[in-house]
Amino acid sequence: MKDYRRIIKDILVTIIILVSLFLCCLAVDNFVHEQAIIPAVFTLGVFIISLITKGYIYGILSCLGSVLAVNYAFTFPYFEFNFTIQENLISAIIMLIITIVTSALTTKVRQQEEIRVETEKEKMRANLLRAISHDLRTPLTTIYGSSQTIVEGGESLSREQISKLADGIKEDSQWLMGMVENLLTVTRIDNNNLKIKKNDVVLWELVDSVLIRFRKRYPKQDIEVDIPEDFISIPMDATLIEQVIVNLLENAVQHAKGMNWLELKVFTVGKNAIFEISDNGCGIEKDKLDHIFEVYFEKKERPVDNHKNSMGIGLAVCASIIKAHEGCITVENRKAGGSCFRFSLSMEETGDEQ
Amino acid sequence: MSNKHKILLIEDENNISNFVKTTLEGQEYKVIVAANGLEGMTLFNSYCPKVVILDLGLPDMDGVELIKEIRKKSDTPIIVLSARSSESDKIEALDLGANDYVTKPFGTGELLARLRATIRNSRHAEGGGAPKDKFVLNDLLIDYDARQIFINGLEIKLTQTEFNIVELLSVHAGKVMTYSEILKKIWGYSDVGSIKKLQVNMANIRKKLGERPGENKYIINELSVGYRMRNTEN
């Protein structure tokens, strides 16, 4: 689909440049009667075409076209083809060489750019894998060790000890569940090349689902909810946006020390819905604010084996989901203390919902 | 409560069937376990279970096929377990006749709640060759004959369509009704464009019933899938 569009665009560009050049030369020829600049003008045109189109084909075709046009319209004998004059042939060959060299250069530059992007992606993926494998170890150790103790400990363990071990297993597997959910999301976005399937989702129903999911995990945490009364429908991938809000709420619970107020607020500005998740906890250190949505940011500074800290991945997932929705996500410290995460989604009908 | 219901669990993962069996037996259900689809079908035929809990990813066949097979001959409620979390899978299973859907990983509490709701729902369906004339859920009362709805004895004014939707959901209380199922039964046809119509009606119903997000007092919203009326108090 993308290739198809690209080809149409290249063909159009080529034709437009050639035709306007031809008209331009006709005008020059009529008014100035100065023929020496005409081949130069065409050479420039062909150069531009090979620069912006992909591959060799457009450049070479337009080069041949220009040679024919110059030969036909602007050199003696006028409005007739004549391939016997040497000057014409030589300028044709020069033009062809310029075209091929330019196309070769631009193609090479494009390939290198592609390789660079690919390597960058590869590097990110490797970083992510490393970060995750590391993060998985700690909860797995808890689960493996605790269950082993229960299985092998037999009757020597008290009821209380067993339930403490089991609690550890439960807590860490819950953490694993969240992590796996985020990973699935990442791969889903990666595979689709940032193209997601949007459905119209009713805001009320989205918030409802988020709250239920969140309260299941944090029954003691109150959330103040402020959403518009009106019927609001937003095109989105509901599972992914649900994940974003849950991640942001969870992030507040785990990182905003001293928080006793957590709010989820949604309002509309023009054709955009703005979501705000605010808390009155400790806020975010200034130097972290700029990098907080980068995947492996926390990795460098946090103490090893402190796995409860690795929401860094959660926030990065939020950022990539919002990016895939063509919205934007920001964070700031509130004047009254605490932090406020904000993201926007367009409410315009996309036309490709199903 | 004496609920010695027979539950058929069709699940190939030993560890999962193990903990599900233990949990259910702790609640006084009688559990029969099948490790693959074929065995599941055989056990289904010979034991006539009250509810089937079915894993969609079986070694010998797709669980979806099994739903079709069971639906050919019986209305026994089916709860689907699956690691596939995309909505389209849920909708497919539900539209084929599954009663409910639990996504792995799930907690035992969630599974038990779904199971109770499903059993209640099927009891409700069995009891009614003759339709009931009233539906009660906490402080909500629906009078089918008078076509009236009350909360705490106060009448809630609904439009015809709104009442039809609430009536439909309450008749199937405990079961997830997909958007297309509701559209077909209320408007007689279902195309994707009309989902919004249903959602708008639903928004009005919720407003009139005084539902607040995150509370789920009467109607549970299954995002991107459909709606379900509660049938258990709490």
Image (spheres, rainbow, N blue to C red):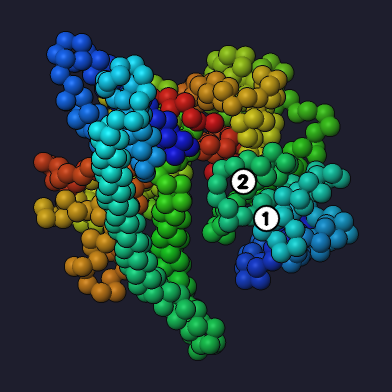
Q: Where residue B11 sits: x, y (%)?
A: 69, 63
Residue situated in front as seen by the camera: A251 or B1: A251
**Is residue A82 positioned above or below A223 on the image?**
above
Check disc 1 and give the amino acid type: Leu
User: In the orientation shown, which residue stands out farthest toward the right?
Assistant: B46
User: In the orientation shown, which residue stands out farthest toward the top?
Assistant: A31
Q: Chain of mark 1?
A: B
In this image, A294 relative to A122: left or right?
left
* Residue beneath disc 1: B56
The residue shown at (20%, 15%) is: A29
Res A95 seen here: no
CB of mark 1 within 8 Å of CB of mark 2?
yes
Q: Where residue A306 sits: x, y (%)?
A: 28, 71
The residue shown at (33%, 21%) is: A72
Quarter of the image where the C terminus of chain A is located:
top right
Res A107 seen here: yes
Q: Where residue A89 sits: x, y (%)?
A: 30, 35
**Is residue A182 positioned above or below A195 on the image?**
below
Residue situated in front as seen by the camera: A149 or A130: A130
**Is residue A314 positioned above or below A241 on the image?**
below
* Residue beneath disc 2: B89
Q: Regarding mark 2 in the picture, which secondary structure is present there?
A: helix
| Disc 2: CA contacts within 10 A as few (<14), some (14-19) or many (>=20) | some
The residue shown at (64%, 30%) is: B180
Marked residue nearer the N-terminal end (1 or 2): 1
Check disc 2 and give the amino acid type: Asp
Q: Regarding mark 1 in the picture, which secondary structure is present there?
A: loop
How many numbered tags mark residues here? 2
**Is residue A272 positioned above or below A173 on the image?**
above
Residues under labels 1 and 2: Cα distance?
10 Å
